[in-house]
Image (tube, rainbow, N blue to C red):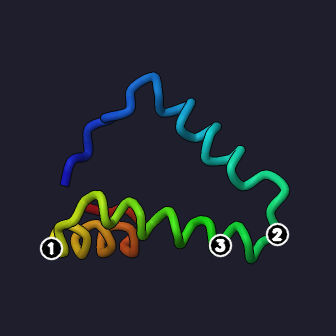
Amino acid sequence: MDLQDNLGADGDSFYAALMAAHEGLTEGQSHALNARLILILANEIGDLDRLETLISAARDDGKI
């Protein structure tokens, strides 16, 4: 698992774009957006073992 900051200065821009995508959505629509985004990103990663490791790390509150 790569724990390096791969976004660098673009991290803030990514966060701003993510928050902007949620503007004006209901809670349900926001959850649906997150689910779709997760599935799109998982498809980009395309490695089930890696995805399972990432899911486990996220569930464990990021403790690695």
Q: Is residue 38 left or right of residue 35?
A: left
Name the residue type under label 1.
Asp
Considering depth in this image, is 60 or 31 the residue closer to the camera?
31
Please report the residue visible at 45 percent of the width from the left and 66 percent of the height from the top.
Answer: 38
Total count of labels: 3
Q: Mark 1, residues whose alpha carbon is within 10 Å: few (<14), some, or many (≥20)?
A: few
| Rendered location of residue 21, percent (x, y) | 68, 50
State the SS at label 1: helix
Please report the residue visible at 63 percent of the width from the left and 74 percent of the height from the top.
Answer: 32
Image quarter where the N terminus lies is bottom left
Sequence-wise, which precedes: disc 1 or disc 3? Answer: 3
The residue pinned by badge 2 equals: 26
Query: In the image, is residue 53 above or below residue 45?
Result: below
Please report the residue visible at 45 percent of the width from the left and 22 percent of the height from the top.
Answer: 9
The residue pinned by badge 1 equals: 49
Tag on residue 31?
3
